[in-house]
Image (spheres, rainbow, N blue to C red):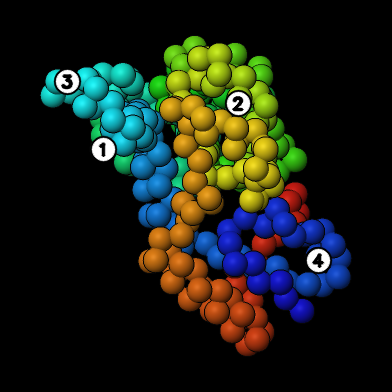
Amino acid sequence: RMVAVAATGTDVVDLPTCAARGIVVSNVRGYAANTVPEHTFALIFALRRSIIAYRDSVRAGRWQQAGQFCYFDYPIRDLTGGTLGLIGDGVLGQAVAAIGRALGMRVIFAARKGAMRPGALYTPFEQVLARSDVISLHCPLTDQTRGMIGEPEFALMARKPLLVNTARGGLVDEAALERALRSGRLGGAGFDVTVPEPPPADSTLMRLLDLPNFILTPHVAWASAEAVQALADQLVENIEAFQRGAPRNIVAVPGSPE
C-alpha cells in the first residue's frame, strides 16, 4: 500500500501510523525549485517598492489629484545593500539566497531556534531577526517550527523588516503578525499560505488586506505551468516505481533512520 503525496510537505499525513502499518509514503521533490523563489521575490519586490499600494492609488485617481508627474505616498526602497535573512537552507532557501546575492544583498541563514552552538555557516536565530531587512521562511511545518515567529520574535525585528512566508501558514502566529503590522514594528508582509486554507472571510490575514503593506496570494507560489507539469511527471514516476517494487522519494518518520 502507498500514499503518494502530490507535494513536498507531508504534514497532512500521519507518518508514524503509516510506518506502523507498512504503508509507503512518497512525496515529490524539487519541482518548485524555480517557481517558489521567483514568487518569493515577486512578493519582496512588490512590498519593498509599494507596487500594490501605488497601483491601487493610481486606480483611485491619486495621480490626477497630485497634478504633477509623480507622487511619493508610499515608501520605495532598493534591495541592494540590504540584508536577507533566511529561515530554512534547503533547495528553496538556497535558490532564494542566490537571487538575493545576485541583487547585491547580504545573505544570512538562521541557525535552528534555540541552538546553543550554531555552525560556522549559520547566524543565531535571534540575530537574523534583529539584523535583517527581509526575512523569508523556507522551512517545513513541524512540532518544533509551529508558531516559531510570534510576539517575542517580532519584538526582536529592530530594522522593521519585510516578512515573507511561502512555506507553511502555521509557522507564524497570525495574531502577533497583525499586531506587528498595525503597530509599525514590521515593515510589511507577503504571505502565500494561511491556516486554514482557504482562510475564513473574517480571518486575521483577510483583515490585514486593508493595509497597503500586506499581500496575500492563494497558495500559488508553487503553481507555475512548468512546476505543475514537473509535479505531475514526478508523481506518476513515484507510483510506477512503487508498482515495480522499487519505491522512490520515500518519506521517513521524523526521528527514524532514513
Q: Nearer the viewer, mark 1 or mark 2?
A: 2
Task: State the CA–CA distance, disc 1 to disc 2.
Answer: 29 Å
Residue that mark 4 sits on? 18
Residue 142, horizontal then vertical, whole percent: 70, 43
Of labels 3 and 4, earlier in sequence is: 4
Of labels 4 and 1, earlier in sequence is: 4
Of labels 3 and 1, earlier in sequence is: 3
Q: Secondary structure at mark 1?
A: helix
Task: State the CA–CA distance, disc 3 to disc 1.
Answer: 38 Å
Q: Residue at x 43, y 27 (%)?
A: 212
Please state which amino acid type lies under the numbered disc 4. Cys
Q: Residue at x 26, y 38 (%)?
A: 102
Q: Is residue 182 left or right of residue 173?
A: left
For residue 67, the mark is 3
> From the viewer's perspective, is residue 140 above or below residue 1?
above
Residue that mark 2 sits on? 177
Q: Nearer the viewer, mark 3 or mark 4?
A: 3
Q: Residue at x 39, y 66 (%)?
A: 225
Q: Residue furthest bottom?
A: 244
